[in-house]
Each structure stands twice: as structure tokens, then as C-alpha cells.
Amino acid sequence: MNVIEDIQRMPKIELHLHLDGSTRKETIWELLNELGENPFSSYEELNNILSIDGKCESLKEYLEAFYFPVKVMQTKEVLTRVSEELAQDLAKEGVIYSEIRFAPYFHQQKGLSIEEVIEAVLKGLSKGERKYKVKSRLIICTMRGFPIEKNIDLVKRAAAFLNKGVVAIDLAGNEHDFPPEESKEVFKLAKSLGFHITVHAGETGKEENIEKAINILGAERIGHGVFAYKNPNILKLIKEKSVFLEMCPTSNLNTNAVKSLLEHPIKTYYDNGLKVTINTDNRTVSNVSLSSEINNIIDKLGFSIEDLERITHYAVEAAFCSSEDKEWLKNIVENYYNK
Ligand SMILES: [Zn+2]
């Protein structure tokens, strides 16, 4: 049995994936040249900046990896192109459904409106869906540290696309300095408009952010939640409320949230009945695919094929798509594992 080939064939679901951190390197190289703003003397040099190998030496190194993708993603054409390319990359490795997220703010340097930015990304994803048969939905990231009024305005604008491709609101950015409660009004509004809620929390050591994201912001899913183990009450809360954890092991290694993949808590959480899902966070920045992450948790953490079947069912349950789409996903997953 070839494990890698088996993983490639598995129907996979990706729920935590950032568009800007998953842009093809070749595309960024090409677009920097087109702009006449390519500061690199070789592709290799760009390559080294765009992907983190192991642990980041500094936050600067991690943030730099997003600088060039964001720099080129400033027109409708490029936003559509990179979204379609991402759909193609996902389809190639057997992803059948994905939820892609991004912060529209970062793509307004050349004057695009929030609506134009979201529309351009949705256009690329639906082209990808038609051509490559991978269904994708969009999650809009509000940002910590941005004025609350701005995040509220973003949610209101995103509401025009609700259930037309956009399914949820996320909270991303510096969780260390901006606690969840600051975004209470933003998420109250999002919930009242009918958005699903996922929140980046417990990624950088502040486990209390997980509890606040669930109790104050109404999070149905937690992005990362690595540090939940620091407080048994938080583990209990996650379990009782049946909150799903979107875990991204290699990304957590890159940002020093875990010392090594062997120490990642995903297996302990899974064994204790928490509903974990496996995701990449940033395909390009972390230099991973969903298949390589699955291979990692089999190889380094002892997940079995039966475990992966269960995790994939958790992902179906956790998905923010319609009930018809969930039924469709469930059938594909069941058919595959019944064989
Ligand atoms: Zn993330």
C-alpha cells in the first residue's frame, strides 16, 4: 500500500485556508515582473521568502511571506486568477470541498471596493468549481486591531454575498493584543444577519480567547485552538458545545505554537472526543498541501485510516455549506470509505 497515493485519493475537505498565503509562487513571480516591481534577482530568492521552513526566526519573517502575494493581489483580474488557481491546486490533490478565507481590506491598495474584491474572488472560485469540480465557499476575515466600525461596515457589505458564495465571518490578526470581547458588536451583527462564525483563537498561547470566542462571539468553530489544553474547563466547553477545531499543525510549528509536530495536541484532542479537523492554513507560506498534512499526522502522530474517516465526517459536520451540499459530501465520503 502506498500511503501517499492513498491520501491523494481520499476525498478531502479543507476548512481553514487563507487565500493570500496559498497563492502559487510562479504566479507571484510572474505578476511582480509584470508590475516591473520584482526586487528579487532569482526565483529561488523569492521562493525562500514565500515559504517558511520549520520555525520562524521572527514575526517579521512570517509576515514577510504575505507581503508579496498581497502586493500583487490588487486588481479584479489577479484576484479572480489566484482564486481559480487555488481551486485547481485543491482539486489536483483530491479536495472536494473547501472554505477559503481572506480579508478584503488588504486588496484595496489600488482603489477596489470591498464589493469588487469579494466579487472577484467569488468569480475565480466559481470558475474553479465549474472547471475542476471542487466546491468552494468563502469566509470573510474581520481584523483585530482595525477600528470596530470598519469591521462592522465590512460585515454589512459582505451580507450582500451571504449564501451567494460567502458563508461565514472570521476574526483574524494579532490575538495577543486584541481580545475577542472587543469584537462583540461585530459578531452580534454577523450572527443576526445569518452568517456562520469561526474565530482564530488559542493560536498564540492565550487559551482564554477560545472561551471568549465561543461564549462572547458565538464561534461554532475555532481556528487552531492549540492552547486549549492549558485549561480543562475550556476543553470541557469545546466538547459540551460541540465546537469544531480547525487545526493546522505545520502552521503551528512555523509560528512556534508547538515545538515539534510530535508535540502537537491534535491527537490528544481527538482521542478525548473533541471534533478536530485537519487543515493547511497557508499552503504556500507553510509549504504544505492537505495531503502532506494528513501524511504528517499519520506518520508523526499515529492517526489511522479509520481516524481519518472520522475526521472527514467531522469536517462534513463542521462545513458551513447548505444541508444539500453536506448530504452530497457525506455520500462521497461514505462511498469512499465503504469500499
Ligand atoms: Zn488562519
Image (tube, helix red, strand yellow):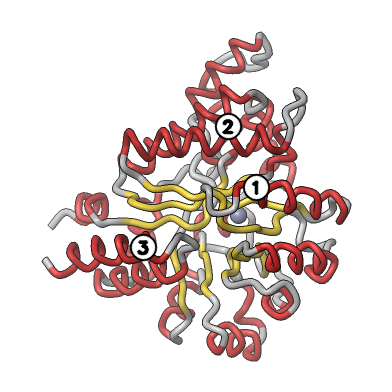
Alpha-carbon span between mark 3 and mark 2: 25 Å
Seen in the picture, residue 167 relative to 50 is either above or below; the reply is: below
Q: Give the residue type that dot 2 points to.
A: Ala
Q: Tell whether 44 sits left or right of 337.
A: right
The residue at 76%/69% (across/down) is 188
Residue behind mark 3: 324
| Mark 3 or 1, nearer chain start | 1
Residue behind mark 2: 120
Where, quadrant-wise, is the C terminus in this rendering?
Answer: bottom left
In terms of secondary structure, where does tag 3 sit? helix
How many C-alpha atoms fall within 10 Å of the one at disc 2: few (<14), some, or many (≥20)? some
The residue at 62%/17% (across/down) is 40
Alpha-carbon span between mark 3 and mark 1: 22 Å
Q: Give the residue type that dot 3 points to.
A: Glu
Viewer-nearest of discs 1 and 2: 1
Alpha-carbon span between mark 1 and mark 2: 14 Å
Seen in the picture, residue 284 relative to 328 is either above or below; the reply is: above
* Res 52 label: none
Viewer-nearest of discs 3 and 2: 3
Instruction: Find residue 120 and report its image quarter.
Output: top right
Across and down, in percent, residue 276 comes to 46, 72
